[in-house]
Image (cartoon, rainbow, N blue to C red):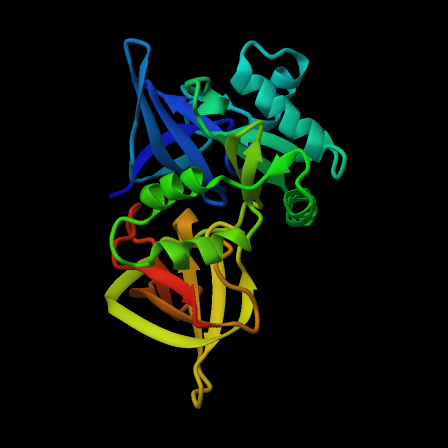
Amino acid sequence: MIDFVKDKEYRAMVHRDFIEKDNKFYAVLSTNPLLCSLRYVRNDRVFKKINGGIVAIEEGETDDIKIFSGRERLKEIMKYQKDKYERDVSDLAKFLSNFTSTENLGISGSGLIKCYGNDSDIDFVVYGAKNFNEAMDAIKQSILNNRAVKNLNPEQWKELYAKRIFGNELTFDEFLWHEKRKFNKGTINNRKFDLLLSDDASINLNFKKTGNITKRGKVVKSNPFSYPAYYEIAEDGNREIIKILCWTHTYVGQAFEGENIEVCGMLEKINSKNRSGKFIIVGTSRKAIGEYIKVMK
């Protein structure tokens, strides 16, 4: 179900910023159209994490929401750090600023709206695909050479597996193999972080579900770290290109062009005057039970 809120300052927002309305905090998924996902609810100064639905925000009608800018929040942290979490955020930003301008960097999640805990992970944002790729390569080189940014330790990998896989979609060994080659996460001062691309892709929600489906094929085109992640595969002996949209972070960066994959998800048809076609959707719910993408080795 899509609820509607309104905002006259929607143009000031970018992908992965947050907005607040009536003590509800939403992550910005797209600004064209402006779509958000409910992530936190505040009650008597206590934040509760929520796996909420999608909210569509209409243009130019009210001014009763507050915008949380990832760029501005990071600038605030880099000027002054009040605790270890913010010092770790600052250290990560300083590391990445050697490879891209700080104007291309920001923060999202609990660190953005200041509801983080002592052990919270960092949701670190890079704006623009080129800048993101440069940052990801810097993380890769640091991990491989055991520098400031390091890989997760065995216990952290197990915690991440429990957080991401809720069924039997991937074994732990399969999960670990896919994750270790992505280089979109790591640790700074032993604190976990995710590197998130903000590219503000246009999102179409006019889909009609037609049933579950499993397919295998070679990846012929991909934007694996965008949101949603996008893959195209070709089956052997079949000229039809199968398009895949991935809404869950678990399978972002999961496969690359030239690799053979198996995908299981919901086959959905676009219901739009301007576009037609079918997509396999991975991540029809936040836990994505029974849905997956994996490389066939």
| Residue 129: percent from left, percent from top | 64, 49
Residue 235 or residue 16, whichever sits in front: 235
Examine the rendering and report whether any part of residue 272 can be seen. no
Q: Quadrant of the N terminus?
A: top left
Query: In this rendering, would 183 be left or right of 280?
Result: right
Residue in the picture at 39% in, 49% down: 248
In this rendering, the answer to whether 176 lies above or below 159 is below
Examine the rendering and report whether any part of residue 254 can be seen. yes
Residue 34 or residue 201, whichever sits in front: 201
| Residue 192: percent from left, percent from top | 50, 33
In this rendering, the answer to whether 118 lies above or below 105 is above
> From this viewpoint, which residue is outermost toward the bottom?
237
Query: In this rendering, would 120 be left or right of 150?
Result: left
Which of the 4 image quarters holds residue 99?
Answer: top right
| Residue 135: percent from left, percent from top | 67, 43
In this rendering, the answer to whether 196 lies above or below 72 is below
Residue 105 or residue 290, whichever sits in front: 290
Query: In this rendering, would 44 be left or right of 115?
Result: left
